[in-house]
């Protein structure tokens, strides 16, 4: 391997997605996984060297992440990873529950048999992922399960609203999966909830499906607030 290739081990491909999109995904995923901790500075020079792109590309990606509320840009300091607060958690989970209940209702109304089969296949993958106890794999399949519901709800305005919350929702989900003090029983409860949700959707029982969404979101919210409280010492 050449010296240049060793230096830019994360250099992004010019023939794939636009450079800004690739840089955005790279930084976003590091924030979601917790590689960049809350409050940490985002150093443009390090990203330029790691990805082999221009300062303009990095700044465009940072602006997008600021819009997604993953980064805050402070005068005289620059971009930092947004600190996760209990107030923000309450707001996000309230909106998440509302949008997910609408998405589930529209999925039941609009989804074809093929879409339902995709949901079932995805749920089976999620079940298997919990046996492996890998946060990254669990998160991947849990995200995929809900993305199928969003996609086949067939409402572009709803999809847009959900997209605006996706990165924040994934960040909270990653925290619940990777925190050293996470509740070891939380994922089993989540699997039980999603199993009930899957069954309610296939039975086209909107009321039951929406009540399960409330149950799952409330459990996730309670766990996140508990973890935030531990990290802040109850402040």
Image (cartoon, rainbow, N blue to C red):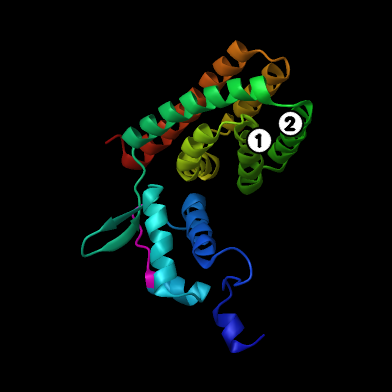
Closer to the camera in the image, 86 or 74:
74
Q: Residues within 10 Å of mark 1 (few under 14, many from 20)?
A: some
Residue at coordinates 75% horizontally, 34% vertically from top-left? Answer: 118
Residue at coordinates 62% horizontally, 37% vertically from top-left? Answer: 147
In the visual, does 149 lie left or right of 172? right
In the visual, does 11 lie left or right of 222? right
Q: Quadrant of residue 154?
A: top right
Task: Please name the predominant secondary structure of the magenta segment in the image.
Answer: loop
Closer to the camera in the image, 195 or 183:
195
Check disc 2 and report the residue beneath it. Answer: 115
Residue 75, position as x, y percentages in the image: 21, 61
The extreme bottom residue here reads 3
Check disc 1 and report the residue beneath it. Answer: 148
Q: Is residue 40 magenta?
A: yes
Closer to the camera in the image, 153 or 169:
153
Q: Residues within 10 Å of mark 2 (few under 14, many from 20)?
A: some
> N-terminal of the two: label 2 or label 1?
2
Magenta stretch, residue numbers = 38-44
Residue 134, position as x, y percentages in the image: 65, 46
Dot 1: element:
helix
* Callout 2–callout 1 Cβ contact below 8 Å: yes
């Amino acid at each position: 391997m050449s010296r240049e290739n060793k230096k830019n081990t994360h250099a992004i491909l010019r023939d794939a997605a636009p450079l800004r999109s690739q840089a955005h995904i790279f930084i976003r995923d590091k924030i979601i996984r917790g590689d960049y901790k809350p409050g940490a500075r985002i150093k443009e020079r390090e990203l330029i060297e790691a990805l082999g792109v221009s300062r303009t590309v990095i700044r465009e990606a940072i602006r997008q992440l600021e819009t997604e509320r993953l980064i805050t840009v402070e005068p005289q300091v620059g971009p930092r990873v947004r600190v996760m607060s209990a107030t923000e958690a309450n707001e996000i989970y309230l909106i998440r529950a509302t949008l997910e209940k609408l998405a589930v209702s529209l999925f039941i109304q609009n989804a074809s048999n093929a879409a339902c089969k995709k949901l079932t296949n995805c749920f089976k993958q999620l079940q298997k992922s919990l046996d492996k106890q890998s946060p990254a794999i669990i998160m991947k399949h849990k995200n995929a399960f809900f993305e199928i519901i969003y996609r086949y709800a067939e409402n572009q305005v709803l999809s847009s609203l959900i997209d605006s919350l996706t990165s924040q929702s994934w960040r909270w989900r990653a925290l619940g999966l990777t925190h050293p003090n996470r509740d070891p029983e939380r994922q089993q409860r989540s699997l039980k909830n999603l199993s009930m949700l899957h069954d309610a959707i296939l039975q086209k029982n909107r009321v039951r499906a929406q009540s399960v969404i409330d149950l799952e979101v409330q459990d996730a919210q309670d766990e996140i607030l508990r973890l935030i409280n531990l990290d802040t010492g109850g402040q």
